[in-house]
Image (tube, grey):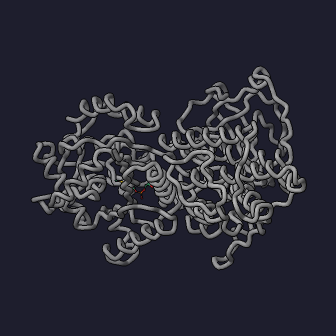
């Protein structure tokens, strides 16, 4: 029986243009949708735009255009993003569409009919960036705790949703669905929040007009989150007449997976199931909250103004490379740093070197030694068998990891296979075998197994890099395969290869050159040469000396909080930090001035080596060392945590 798989992204606000953050969620959802299609599921993949609310109204006023024109324009940019990034969404929903107004009003009526909506007065602090009332106790220095923006005092008549009534039903639901929110630690946050008690929720506004009118009381428009969350049902046909719409709702609801950023978890894991319960509809099956892309240590966001444009990376590296980078770099649920250095390093190491070389050396040798036709494998020896086992194991592992949304791990597994095949080729030295006619059988076996592994590799990278997968298939002369049919040894001997072409040519430009490139200067990567025997031998990895656990434990790594930070006169690289180590306050000199401004650091938790001997740097005594990572030649990035830890906590 066919399994349904319904996946959604958040619908994006249209107060600004899309950036890497929006691109990320959309690309991950796309990879998931593609993987499920390869597994034979009946997939429905939805994305779109969230167009109502005060901040859109204000953004349009600021741009000097009427709200609808503004909305059409920015929604168009999000649609374009989908085309630019090879997104295979089945629908693109806009909340300004009539079908959505109908659906949101239908949901409202059902909740109201259940007695869960009443009218009252509301006064409170409202953040128009996040479109949310913030309880006074949660304000941070009088500002919104989520975005740091200004909050406004609002007093208005409002409809309320009886959220308090759903505290126990929600807790019961969470208990019955232990995988409802992933990752688990985020689920715990939601549970604690609900356990602490819920207040009724104001769900209408009278202070602006750009929204969906409340049924039978058009002086009110719906709270944007009531409106926005309903989109996930609208797209299936909820609120529309006719049995077809009804059938589609039944087909895909509630087997839905909402992929979101962690900042909107509360709305999805709490408000949304409560609204649905009140309407007599089952809550969604799963909410997956991913982490944030950071730039310079802070969340990339349009309000902070530190955004990277996806277009710039597509232009220099290509769509597939951008898709690969973001999915390889950010493990599910954790934050990750977005940097040009990171993208360039991964491009050259993983794509040009590992994958690109495998493709080029395998196909080139089949052309050179076998007239471009896949040879028969003949007898297998132990080395061939170990490669086959590796292929089989990798297929199983990748499927399992995708099913758990662990795309990063799936890619790591795939790259282990790629490196295994590269080593297999180096061990066999087919270029040497080709010189000895008596070794013909071994040469054929080697090239067959390498090409077979490449065919499987193309299938496994397909959800993440669909274009590269297709190009590999063209070079191999094979067709797309379902994951359900994928096994080692599936390549047909006698298959005629297509022409070999460079897949990910190394980019030899420096970051500086890449940054200053004009749009029509396409990157001029170095030719990816067909592998010559001399190049095919990667340098043997040097044996790193190991340390014992006792030696490692001598290093006292601790969490510390930055209390003060200042530049050191005449030093380009050094900052002087005063930190709280939980036991004392001390001065540490850190070489991070080129990557961080002093004011970005105050209040931040860092990791220090607490028992380092003091040293004087530029005349300042430093009592410890700050931990940061840096790519070759790149800027340091401070080590951090995805949850706050108190100063003094041990790190190991
Ligand atoms: O919240 N890192 O829309 P939005 C990772 N309209 N992902 C990021 C990101 C970052 N730095 N910045 C944005 C809304 N995103 C509401 C949603 S749903 C019914 C309504 C991604 O335009 C991530 O998916 O602010 C995040 O949840 C979403 O964009 C927020 O988009």
Q: Is residue 568 visible?
A: no
Q: Residue at x 13, y 58 (%)?
A: 215
At x 53% / y 36%, what residue is drawn? 643
Viewed as shown, does residue 197 lie left or right of 552?
left
Say which quadrant the N terminus sits in: top left
Residue 269 seen by the camera: yes
The quarter of the rendering in which ligand 1 is drawn is bottom left
In this view, 139 is above or below 512: above
Query: As drawn, is 162 to the left or to the right of 600?
Result: left
Along the line of sight, the residue nearer the viewer: 469 or 17: 469
Question: Across the whole image, how many numbered discs are drawn on residues?
Answer: 0
Report x, y in % for residue 451: 69, 54
Q: Quadrant of the C terminus?
A: top right
Residue 269 image point, x, y percent:
34, 41
556 vs 10, nearest the viewer? 10
- Image position of 280 (left or right of 298): left
Whole-percent x, y for residue 525 in the image: 74, 69
Q: Residue 42: x, y in percent?
A: 37, 52
Residue that appears at 39% across and 74% down: 73
**Residue 584 placement, left or right of 165:** right
From the viewer's perspective, is residue 396 above or below residue 598? above
Residue reaching furthest top?
A: 550
Q: Residue 137 sits in which quadrant?
A: top left
């Amino acid at each position: 029986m066919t399994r349904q798989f319904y996946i959604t992204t958040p619908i994006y606000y249209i107060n600004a243009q899309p950036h890497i953050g929006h691109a990320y969620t959309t690309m991950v959802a796309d990879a998931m949708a593609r993987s499920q299609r390869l597994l034979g599921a009946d997939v429905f993949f939805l994305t779109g735009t969230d167009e109502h609310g005060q901040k859109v109204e204000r953004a349009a006023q600021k741009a000097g255009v009427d709200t609808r024109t503004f909305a059409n324009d920015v929604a168009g940019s999000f649609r374009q993003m989908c085309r630019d990034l090879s997104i295979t969404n089945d629908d693109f929903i806009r909340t300004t569409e009539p079908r959505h107004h109908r659906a949101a009003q239908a949901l409202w009526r059902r909740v109201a009919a259940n007695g869960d909506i009443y009218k009252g007065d509301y006064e409170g602090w409202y953040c128009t960036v996040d479109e949310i009332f913030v309880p006074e106790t949660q304000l941070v220095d009088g500002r919104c705790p989520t975005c740091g923006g200004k909050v406004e005092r609002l007093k208005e008549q409002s409809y309320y949703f009886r959220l308090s009534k759903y505290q126990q039903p929600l807790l019961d639901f969470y208990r019955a669905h232990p995988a409802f929110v992933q990752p688990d630690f985020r689920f715990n946050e939601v549970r604690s929040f609900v356990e602490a008690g819920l207040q009724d929720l104001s769900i209408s506004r009278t202070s602006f007009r750009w929204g969906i009118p409340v049924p039978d009381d058009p002086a009110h428009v719906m709270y944007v989150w009531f409106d926005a969350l309903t989109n996930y049902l609208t797209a299936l046909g909820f609120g529309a007449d006719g049995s077809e719409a009804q059938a589609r709702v039944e087909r895909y609801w509630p087997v839905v997976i909402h992929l979101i950023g962690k900042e909107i978890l509360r709305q999805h894991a709490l408000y949304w199931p409560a609204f649905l319960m009140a309407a007599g509809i089952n809550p969604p099956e799963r909410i997956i909250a991913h982490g944030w892309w950071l730039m310079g240590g802070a969340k990339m966001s349009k309000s902070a103004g530190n955004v990277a444009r996806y277009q710039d990376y597509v232009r220099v590296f290509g769509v597939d490379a951008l898709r690969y980078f973001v999915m390889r770099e950010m493990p599910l649920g954790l934050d990750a740093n977005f940097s040009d250095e990171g993208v360039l390093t991964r491009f050259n190491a993983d794509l040009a070197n590992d994958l690109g070389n495998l493709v080029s050396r395998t196909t080139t040798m089949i052309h050179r030694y076998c007239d471009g036709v896949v040879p028969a494998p003949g007898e297998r020896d132990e080395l061939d068998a170990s490669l086959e086992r590796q292929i089989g194991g990798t297929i199983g592992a990748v499927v399992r990891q995708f099913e758990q949304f662990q795309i990063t791990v799936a890619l790591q597994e795939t790259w282990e296979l790629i490196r295994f095949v590269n080593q297999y080729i180096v061990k066999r030295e087919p270029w040497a075998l080709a010189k000895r006619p008596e070794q013909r059988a071994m040469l054929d076996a080697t090239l067959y197994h390498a090409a077979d592994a490449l065919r499987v590799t193309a299938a496994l990278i397909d959800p993440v890099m669909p274009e590269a997968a297709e190009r590999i298939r063209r070079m191999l002369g094979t067709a797309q395969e379902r994951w359900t049919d994928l096994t080692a040894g599936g390549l047909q001997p006698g298959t005629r290869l297509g022409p070999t072409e460079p897949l990910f040519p190394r980019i030899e430009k420096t970051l500086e050159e890449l940054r200053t490139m004009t749009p029509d200067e396409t990157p001029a990567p170095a030719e990816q040469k067909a592998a010559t025997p001399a190049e095919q031998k990667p340098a043997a990895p040097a044996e790193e000396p190991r340390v014992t656990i006792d030696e490692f434990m001598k290093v006292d790594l601790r969490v510390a909080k930055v209390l003060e930070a200042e530049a050191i006169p005449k030093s380009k690289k050094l900052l002087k930090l005063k930190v709280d180590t939980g036991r004392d306050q001390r001065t540490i000199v850190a070489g991070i001035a080129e990557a961080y401004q002093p004011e970005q650091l105050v209040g931040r938790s860092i990791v220090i080596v607490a028992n380092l001997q003091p040293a004087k740097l530029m005349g300042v005594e430093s009592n410890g060392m700050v931990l940061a990572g840096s790519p070759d030649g790149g800027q340091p990035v401070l080590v951090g945590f995805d949850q706050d830890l108190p100063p003094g906590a041990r790190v190991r």
